[in-house]
Amino acid sequence: MSVVDRLRLGVSVGVSKTVTSLVRSLRLGAASVLPGEVARRLQPKALPLLFQQVRRGVILVVGTNGKTTTSLLLSTILEAQGWRVAHNTTGANLINGLVTTLLENTNLLGQLDADYAILEVDENILPLLLRDCQPQFILGLNLFRDQLDRYGEVDTISRRWQEAIAPLPTDTRVILNADDPTLSHLGQQLPQKVLFFGLSEPDLYLDEIPHAVDSIYCPSCGHPLDYEGVYLSHLGDYRCPSCGFTKSQLAVDSQEWPQILIGVYNKYNTLAAGLVAREMGIDTAAIYGTIKNFRAAFGRAEELDVNGKHVRILLSKNPVGMNETIRAVSDIQKQGGASTKLLILNDRTPDGTDVSWIWDVDTEKLVELGGTIIVSGDRVYDMALRLRYSQTEGDNNLRLVVKEDLQEAIATALELTPANETLHILPTYSAMLEVRGLLTGRKIL
């Protein structure tokens, strides 16, 4: 690092830390994005200069769903081993958020104190980030449709990933989800060492392929895949009858592993983080111990006590994510709980401005169980209409409540939740931040 670069980095760190202090002291938010933007304006090379200082390695966690939970679990495992970890705990996964995370672990001279950097990364910026970083591990969770107005189709993203990863050193280790045909095929094309995780539990198959299916065609030849069973969306056990492409061999047996939180999607998150930790040489018993004591990241099955009522927030920002939260909540409701739900739909930039995806969500499964559903958000009437179209003549046990004002919607949902049950809130991303701000008095900035 040149003297000029070091001086500019030191200045950018000092100013950014001042911004962080002001934002937090004035209770404007968590200061997870703005300091990084300030630092990059003062030192455009801030990110690569900080990456160079990570002592043992950088681990990038990418994918459409599960990044925040998986990266938090992996960070928790490493910290339990005594390592110092820089981790974007708030889920700010664009460039400014990544810079902010690393700045949090620097002194006023711009010297970074971290053994590892575990960074969840927005799937669209991975190629950009790899220009400034040579990670030790890249962990790919899944690829689903998520904001088509910003990203495009999954095969486009996969091609960009392959072009960006292939030139990396061959000792870069890539961990991918074999149950996702797109990622399985990607891994089979890479020159690096690639290991795969996935499920081997046919009892978890869905009864039918859901509406929110993105990739049921062979990524090699384009022929429809034959599925033995589907775990969620297009993730499952498959083969191509035309070219012979098939699911990659798994490096772990999912039946032997415990899991964090609720839902099949968290089984995937557990296996992903656990496989990386195992490859880093961490003892399996230590990994299992962290899994059993894990607590959720904010908004991802996070649980709160509010006014004497128990609340669980389940981020639902795309068709696959919402289908899986509906699946988890429905299972709880069938067991006598979760009779009250709050669905919040926004269409702001972090959510994606196109909300047509809600018509790919299997809301029928939520409606048919009845109970009370409160809807709110910027597109409250779109969500209410989707639920109405999900009803049949036999669905007479549903109480649908429409509340334009979010604070009023939360108050109503809490009031209607029985004392012995949990209120389940299913928000899009910006709605989740608003909900947490109202429930905890803390926003994200």
Image (cartoon, rainbow, N blue to C red):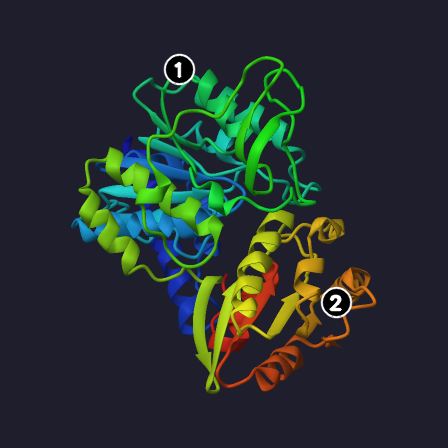
Which residue sits at x=63%, y=14%?
242
Above or below 147: residue 412: below
What type is the residue that disc 2 sits on?
A: Val
| Label 1 to label 2: alpha-carbon separation | 48 Å
Which residue appears farthest toward the top when viewing the image?
243
Q: In this view, does 243 lie to the left or right of 57?
A: right
Residue 420 visible? The answer is yes
The secondary element bearing badge 1 is classed as loop
- Image quadrant assignment for residue 430: bottom right
- Image quadrant assignment for residue 433: bottom right
* Nearer to me, 419 or 146: 419
Residue 103 visible? The answer is no
- The location of residue 220, given as percent across then percent down, is 59, 17
Which residue sits at x=20%, y=53%?
80
Image quadrant in which the N terminus is located: top left
- C-beta proximity under 8 Å, tags 1 and 2: no
- The location of residue 252, given as percent across then percent down, is 33, 35
Q: Is residue 109 left or right of residue 194?
A: left
* Nearer to me, 294 or 168: 294
**Mark 2 Cα within 10 Å, few/some/many (few <14, many 20+)?**
many
Above or below 322: residue 139: above
- The location of residue 103, given as percent across then percent down, is 34, 50
What type is the residue that disc 1 sits on?
A: Pro
The secondary element bearing badge 2 is classed as helix
First-in-chain label (1 vs 2)? 1
Give the labeled residue for mark 1: 191
Which residue sits at x=61%, y=80%?
413
Give the labeled residue for mark 2: 380
Residue 421 shows which numbered tag? none
* Nearer to me, 93 or 148: 148
Which residue sits at x=45%, y=46%?
67
